[in-house]
Amino acid sequence: FQNQRSFYFWLCNSLEIYCPVQWEYSRLNLNYSVMSKRKIIKLIEEKIVNDWDDPRLFTLSALRRRGVPPEAINYFCSKVGVTMASNVISPTLFYSCVREVLNIKAKRVMALLEPLSVTIVNCDSVLSVSVPDFPFDPSLGSRKLTFGNKIFIDSSDFDIKNCDTDFRRLTPTQSVGLMHVGKVLTLLEIITKSNCVDHLLCKIDDLTQANRPRAFIQWVHEGLKCETRIYNELFQHADPDSVQGGFLKDINENSIVVYKDCLVEKTTKHAKHLENFQFERIGYFCVDIESNDEKMVFNRTVQLK
């Protein structure tokens, strides 16, 4: 518009009408993405993304569906400022702003992407546990959970080979703590089926200073089955247009990873669409608009760090 400003003012003055003032700013571009409407339409036509609200895009409708709060977008924009010069921002700063807002806003729940069944041989009763929704301020509310002799842990928290000294969670020779219940889980036996781990037999002990483990993990007892969608960068390179053949040749095949048999606390059963949660030790998630009474779907908004 700046090149035509003098002609625009001349026309307004000739017609004796008010000359409104214009401010011009460059488009806010982000690495690993495209912001051009023409290019986004091409992605939709090629069925690389589903629509304008596909959470891998950076349109407002896509960010909303991904669970990004409006406050986080405003916070990000206030940090980067405005300029007339063309520039490209790393999405790392954007994700940092989202995490900062969700850390205060999102309730904590326990969830498992790949559940592994655990039978506790010395647990004869069902315990009731009160867990704060926001650990930094228990006065903001809490939820009631149950703990019994049949629980699930995430399969990534169990290492059958026990060959990595940096692995801090459950192994055949190493116990692990269970979050929020003050218990230590120790492996007794591995039950296999078709040469794969089917479930674990374990025992629990009260947590003491003497048996304090190297790590604590989340668990779920009588959880709610759900689908979880993990969103990553849509493109492989920071500047998709620089790739030979154009941005359509730079698509990241792992831009979406779907876990269909996840478990999450039953406290999320009546959550509203787009409601935010922090899956402890995993990341920030929101309830997708495709969720219904038969199947809950969660979208990952951003990783924990």
Image: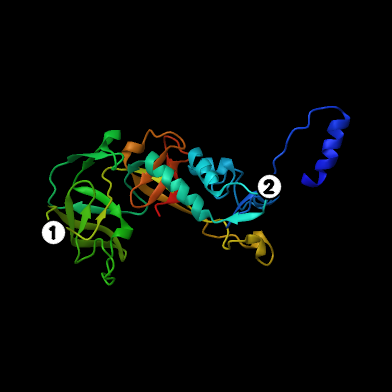
Residue 41 horizontal side relative to residue 303, left or right: right
For residue 297, side relative to residue 174 (left or right): right
C-beta proximity under 8 Å, tags 1 and 2: no
Q: Which of marks 1 and 2 is nearer the N terminus?
A: 2
Residue at point 36%, 37% (across, down): 268
Dot 2 falls on a residue whose secondary structure is helix
Figure check: 239 above or below 291: below
Which of the labelled discs sits on residue 28, or is there none? none
Image x and y of residue 266, in percent: 32, 38
**Residue 236: quarter of image:** bottom right
The quadrant in which residue 252 appears is bottom right
Q: Can residue 300 be seen in this view?
A: no
Task: Tell me the quarter of the picture where residue 130 sits.
Answer: top left
Report crowding for label 2: few under 14, some 14 to 19, many 20 or more residues within 10 A (C-alpha).
few
Q: Quick check: can you spot residue 239? A: yes
Distance between mark 1 and mark 2 Cα atoms: 58 Å
Locate the N terminus and report the quarter of the image it occupies.
top right
Viewer-nearest residue: 96 or 292: 96
Badge 1: few (under 14), some or many (20 or more) residues near its Cα, within 10 Å?
some
Mark 1 element type: loop
Q: What residue type is labelled 2?
A: Lys
- Image location (x, y in percent) of residue 8: 83, 38
In front: 22, or 61? 22
Task: Name the amino acid type tagged 1.
Answer: Asn
Residue found at the far right of this picture? 14
> What residue do we see at 48% from left, 51% from top?
95
* Position of residue 185 measured from the top left corner of the image (x, y, whole percent): 18, 56
In the picture of the structure, the residue carrying the numbered disc 1 is: 211
Q: How is the image coloured?
A: rainbow
Dot label at residue 37: 2
